[in-house]
Amino acid sequence: MPHPKPNFQRMLSLIDEVFATRNDPDQLQVTPAQLKKLEQIHPATLSEFANEDGPLIWVLIIPTTEKIMNGFLSGNLSEKQLLEKTKPGQAYDCIYLCSVTTLPEARGKGETKKLCIKAINAVSKDHNITTLFVWPFTKEGETLAESLANVCGMTLLKKSV
């Protein structure tokens, strides 16, 4: 079995460092079953920008309904429950900017924003998306979400950390 490219492990470490998903049972930890469901929800849920060393940027968005979004933002639903309650084939009207991870050498070049816009636009072609929502873990993540909502002409809602 081939070893993963060097950036793969760096991305996983960065996710652990920023989001601490292993220490929070309510956060999404993407498993093979969840990957399959995300693909069924929409092919643009997962995006990657990579080079010969592997991934430099990973973007995870989850299209969902306003009812599910409001449950999450109010604290009545966890991140895991948000994905559980979002069913493939539903009419989605909002997008959860779940996770954006960029290695240091890829930051500040506009590639992350471009990748996010491409994913959001792909979902928006198939659904009437009016709202972007985020649970910001970093100031950079919050700034990115604000910029994306502005560029894509959407309302931005934020969950408190």
Image (cartoon, helix red, strand yellow):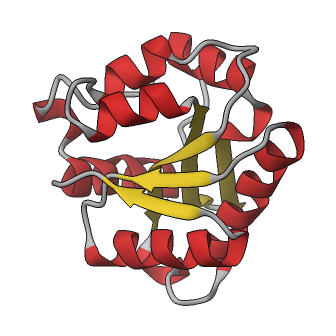
Question: Which residue lies at the image location 48% right of the left edge and 68% below the top edge?
Answer: 145
78 w.r.t. 96: above or below:
above
Q: x, y percentage for residue 71? A: 33, 28
Quadrant for the C terminus in the image:
bottom left
| 143 over 123 or under it: above or below | below
- For the question of whether residue 51 can be seen, the reply is no
Q: Residue furthest left?
A: 23
- Count of numbered labels shown in the rendering: 0
* Residue toward you, 7 or 158: 158
- Which residue reaches farthest bottom? 108
Q: Residue 42, how many percent across, how many down?
A: 75, 29
Say whether residue 146 is left or right of residue 23: right
Q: Residue at point 62% right, 24% down?
A: 38
Q: In which quadrant of the rendered view does residue 104 lie?
A: bottom left
Q: Nearer the viewer, residue 7 or 77?
A: 77
Q: Position of residue 62 (x, y in %)?
A: 57, 36
Q: Nearer the viewer, residue 17 or 19?
A: 19
- Taking the image as shown, residue 139 lies to the left or right of residue 132, namely left
Q: Residue at x 80, y 48 (%)?
A: 124
Quarter of the N terminus within the rendering: top right
Residue 33, above or below 94: above
Q: Position of residue 91 (x, y in %)?
A: 73, 24
Q: Residue furthest right?
A: 125
Tell me the quarter of the picture where residue 110 sits: bottom right
Q: Is residue 96 left or right of residue 75?
A: right
Position of 90 compared to 35: left or right? Answer: right
**Residue 116 in sight in this render:** yes
Q: Residue at x 69, y 70 (%)?
A: 153
